[in-house]
Image: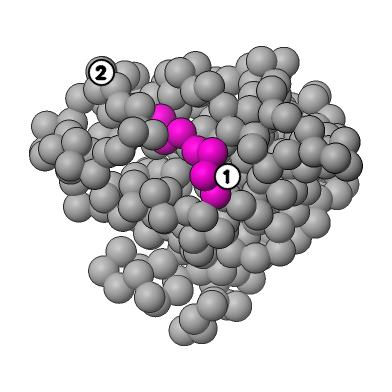
Amino acid sequence: MSRADASGLPSLSLKISVITAVFNRRDTVADAIQSIQKQTYDHIEHVVQDGGSQDGTLKVLGDHSNANTLLVSAPDSGIYDAINKGIKRATGDVVGLMHSDDYFASDSVLEKVATAFRDPDVDGVYGDLQYVSAIAPEKIVRHWESGDYDPDLLKRGWMPPHPTLYLRTGVFERLGLYDTSYRIAADYDAMLRYLVRGQIKLAYIPEVLVKMRVGGVSNRSLRHIIQKSREDYRAIRTNEIGGIGTLMMKNFSKVRQFVKSGNQKY
């Protein structure tokens, strides 16, 4: 556990574990690694769970690793299985994700995350997310301004942007890891489980924390979009926070994010 300072609050020496699940991402994973290594916060471990890449990703990982990089390469049954393996290997007080196509919006993100966790009642911290063009990352495709959390928002399809979410390790110990029976929406199911059943307390950082290149597994094709909606609906019903109306509001809320983004640069 992290030490306490003179105020009685946890000090900024709490350890943050950043999990990267990667498979055949040689062209983007270096940006993710460098983004972590540039952080001004010192107490970080980078847990990299490679699925047995064959495209040169392992060489990139080796070339960019440092003393804080914990790399394992082994077969897995999908991204959520890989994330679960990474969480089990993590030794930090707090765990978050850095997908292999993503990068931090600034060098001070984790310092701000650590500061938010100085409140001992806070179980999780999240912020805003920007989707950017894979070809031209300076071009913003979608701006997700998540806003403050209110439990009533869950029935209207609200969720914190998963790539920006950091949780105390105790949340996973108490409420479980990602359900790998979901192939695309295990993150949504887990967040609903933590918020509804776990009643965890979230703190919001009102700024962009992570930038994500477009083209993720959940929006890769019409078939994936349909599967994502089916899994989202299953998560909604399993966690008893609504029905088809909740799913419709969840999907409709994305339209506003595209309209707002335009060609703005944040």
Q: Residue 67 vs residue 146: left or right?
A: left
Query: Magenta stretch?
Result: 41-48
Q: Measuring from the top left, give residue 258's x and y in whole percent.
A: 54, 72
Q: Measuring from the top left, give residue 85's x and y in whole percent.
A: 43, 19
Question: For numbered disc 2, what is the local secondary structure?
Answer: loop
Tell me the residue that label 2 is attached to: 74
* Main secondary structure type of the part rendered in magenta: strand
The residue carrying pointer 2 sits among few (fewer than 14), some (14 to 19) or many (20 or more) residues within 10 Å by Cα, namely few
Question: For numbered disc 1, what is the local secondary structure?
Answer: helix
Tell me the residue that label 1 is attached to: 162
Q: Nearer the viewer, mark 2 or mark 1?
A: 2
- Distance, label 2 to label 1, CA atoms, is 24 Å
- Frontmost residue, 74 versus 220: 74
Q: Measuring from the top left, give residue 237's x and y in whole percent.
A: 71, 29
Total count of labels: 2
- Quarter of the image where the N terminus is located: top right
